[in-house]
Image (cartoon, grey):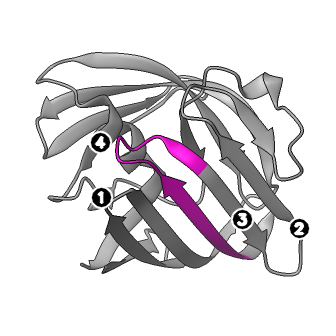
Amino acid sequence: MRSVRWASEDGSGLEHLEFDAQPEGFVVESVLAGDRFEGEYGLIYRVECDVHWRVTRVVMKLAGGGTLELLGDTNGNWTDGSGAPRDDLKGCIDIDISATPFTNTLPIRRLGLNKDERRVIRVVYIAVPAMTVEAVEQAYTCLEPDRLYRYEGIFRQFTAELPVDEDGLVIDYPTLFRRVTN
């Protein structure tokens, strides 16, 4: 079990994350408070992955708001918490929760990119605090194996270079988040 904290660059938010590597996969539980386009929010989330970093479940609860649950079969098929298929998310293996740098770890670890290798992927993008869900294209490039990756949010024309630690957790996310504890 490992604890990590990030603060937003503008000082309006903080995230406390518990990362647990287990024999059957990885579990992350986190609580964060922040301020984004739609206003202030508090969020608790849990992400479960298999040993290959493929998301099997994400549950999110917005303080004073709704709950979102998605289940993945690790082959790009998704259902909501009640078991209804989410065909709009077909082909996505990873998730991206907009309010946290943690979810960049998922494709970084899962893809196992070699130096200068770039891969375009479809991910389940979850906007916070709106709690909207859509499939979007992103790309990751390995600049220095196990140390530095380029993230491209193709759907919004955004690029950032992300340094990571020995677990693949983002250290700093330029203009958005910075690590305050390991």
Q: Residue at x 80, y 80 (%)?
A: 63
Q: On screen, 42 above or below 119?
A: below
Q: What label sits on residue 169 in the rendered view?
A: 1
For the point 39% across and 44% down, the residue is 53
The quadrant holding residue 166 is: bottom left
- Specify which label sits upstream in the sequence, 4 or 3: 3
Q: Residue at x 74, y 58 (%)?
A: 37
Estimate the spatial distance between the alpha carbons at disc 4 and disc 3, rounded to whole Å. 22 Å
* 15 on left or right of 70: left
The residue nearer to you, when weighing 78 against 134, is 78
Residue annotated with mark 4? 109
Residue at image mark 3:
60
Give the image quarter of residue 9: bottom left
- Residue 66: mark in rendering: 2
Q: Is residue 106 magenta?
A: no
User: What are the residue bounds of the magenta stretch?
Assistant: 42-56
The answer to whether residue 45 is magenta is: yes
What's the amino acid at mark 2? Gly
Q: CA distance from mark 4 to mark 1?
A: 9 Å
Q: Residue furthest front?
A: 23
Can you give x and y, in whole percent of width and height, for residue 110 in the image? 34, 36
Q: Position of residue 170 (x, y in %)?
A: 30, 57
